Amino acid sequence: MPSRESSDPYYDLFEDWDLIVSSFLSQYGLRIRTKEFETVSWDEFRALLAGLSPETALGRIVAIRSETDKNVIKHFSKEQMRIYNEWRDSSAKKITAENFADQMADLERMMAAIVGG
C-alpha cells in the first residue's frame, strides 16, 4: 500500500493533493481523476510526481517550503512567509519521539566530535 510519506519532505500526498492534480494537468496534460489514469502504476505515478517542474503549482509551493537562503526568505512576500511558516510548523508537529531521540543522539555525537570526546 502506498505510504502517505513522500521521499520529498516538502510535500504531503494528501494535504497537497489539489496541487498535485493541478500540476499533472498543467505539465503533462493528464487528468488524475479519470478511468484512464487508474491504470498508472504507483512507481510510474511517483516518477511523474518527481518530474514536476518548479513552474507547476506544486513546484512553486515546494520552492517556498524548501528555501534555506536567509536572504531570500527575508524578502518573501506575506503570502510566501505564510506558506513557509505553516509548513515548518506542520513539519515540526510530525516529529516522532523516536525521530527526536535519533536526532538528539546524532547531535550528541557531533558535539562530542567537536570537543574531542
Image (cartoon, rainbow, N blue to C red):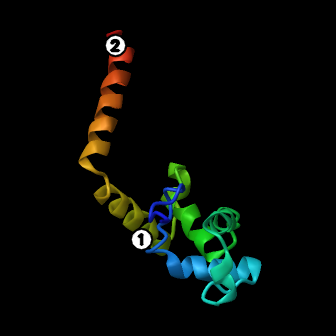
Total labels drawn: 2
Relative vertical location of residue 79 with respect to residue 105 in this rendering, above or below: below
Foreground: disc 1 or disc 2:
2
Question: In the image shown, does 50 or 90 lie closer to the viewer?
Answer: 50
The amino acid pointed to by label 2 is Val
Question: In the image shown, does 50 or 70 lie closer to the viewer?
Answer: 50
When asked about the image quadrant of residue 117, the answer is top left
The residue that mark 1 highlights is: 82
27 vs 23, left or right, is right
The residue that mark 2 highlights is: 115
Provide residue 113's location: percent of width, then percent of height. Answer: 38, 16
Label 1: how many Cα within 10 Å (few below 14, some 14–19, many 20+): some
Relative vertical location of residue 97 with respect to residue 27 in this rendering, above or below: above
Provide residue 106's location: percent of width, then percent of height. Answer: 35, 30
Q: Which mark is residue 98?
A: none
Distance in Å between CA atoms under marks 1 and 2: 39 Å
Relative vertical location of residue 7 with respect to residue 48 in this rendering, above or below: above
Q: Earlier in the sequence, mark 1 or mark 2?
A: 1
Residue that sits furthest to the top in the current view? 116
Residue that sits furthest to the left in the current view? 97
The amino acid pointed to by label 1 is Arg
Residue that sits furthest to the bottom in the current view? 34
Q: What residue is shown at x 45% (from left), y 74% (from top)?
A: 14
Provide residue 110's location: percent of width, then percent of height. Answer: 38, 23
29 vs 41, left or right, is right
